[in-house]
Amino acid sequence: MTEDKPLSGKQAVFFDVNQTLVVRGLSFEASFREVWSRYTARWSTDDTPDAGQLWQAYIGKWHHRKKARATFKQLDELQQQCLREAFEEQQIPFSSAMTRDFMKEVLQLQVSAKTMPPHTLETLAALAPRCKLAIISNSPRAEVMLLLQRFGLHPFFPQERIYTALKPADKKPAPLLFKTALQALQLPPRHAVMVGNSWKHDVCGAVKAGLDAVWLHEDRDSAAEGKKISQHRLGKRKVYLIRRLDQMLDLFP
């Protein structure tokens, strides 16, 4: 890089959550199947659909709803609606409380299996005095809040600085969440930067909204520890490639 501290002048850093601040232990599908197995273990009937059948019914409803761009207040409401429809298709008796509790268990199982990359807390603690930290995530707000609480990250991210999608069409790389966050913080795009692991959602989405971006692209290669930050151009914006989250500190004055 030609600049010692290329993010000088940035007043806000937006972070993705999943696979950026925390890393996945169990997939949503694995968690879903496990919770259904727990439910059916309590029942004595032999004709109950197995986890694979219910999952296929659920994911079919999910893709249909997403394609139709159905509007729900929150993404977790969409999940519950798809589960209700899957139960109906499989002729499984259910109540609103059951679908709510089922999805809550799936979320809790996913969260409990996640871990935090090394130096995450130290990196956020060092950045917090220098600029405002915020979240821009495609995950349901309830999941984001649960993750921040579980890993002790909530002091860095006040609730008013957590921006999540209300419906599928709002999700990154759509510009809405980026623009909402900038508006709330009263900042022009050039004074903020987006950090995330997804090239499509975090990097391309941020660049389209006029922000510079930091792409966290971990390398499993044992030599990755020694790899330097690299700088690239995407349209008119700058993109910085880092291998570890603590390399963020090398970008800030």
Image (cartoon, grey):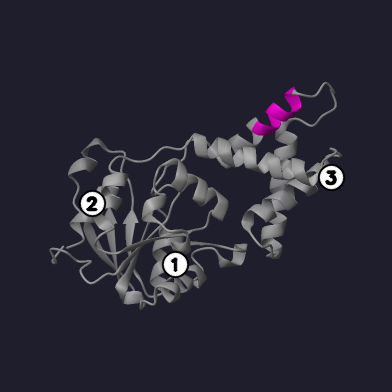
Which type of secondary structure does the marked residue at label 1 adopt? helix
**Mark 3 Cα shell of 10 Å, populated few (<14), some (14-19), many (≥20):** few
> Which residue matches tag 3?
88
103 in the magenta segment: no
User: Is residue 153 toward the left or the right of residue 48 in the image?
Assistant: left
In whole angstroms, how far apart are the C-alphas of marks 1 and 2? 22 Å
Q: Amino acid at mark 1?
A: Gly
User: In this picture, is 243 found above or below 105?
Assistant: below
User: Is residue 46 toward the left or the right of residue 120 in the image?
Assistant: right
User: Is residue 16 toward the left or the right of residue 111 in the image?
Assistant: left
Q: Amino acid at mark 2?
A: Gln
The residue at the point 28 percent across, 64 percent down is 131
Asked if residue 148 can be seen in this view, the reply is yes
Q: What span is colored magenta in the figure? A: 35-41
| Residue 195, percent from left and from top | 35, 58
| Residue 133, percent from left and from top | 35, 60
In whole angstroms, how far apart are the C-alphas of marks 2 and 3? 49 Å
Q: Main secondary structure of the magenta part?
A: helix
| Residue 1, percent from left and from top | 16, 62
**Residue 164 — which label?**
none
User: In this picture, is 57 found above or below 13?
Assistant: above
> Which residue matches tag 1?
205
> Which residue matches tag 2?
247
Question: For this rendering, which residue is in front, 125 or 94?
Answer: 125
| Residue 9, percent from left and from top | 23, 72
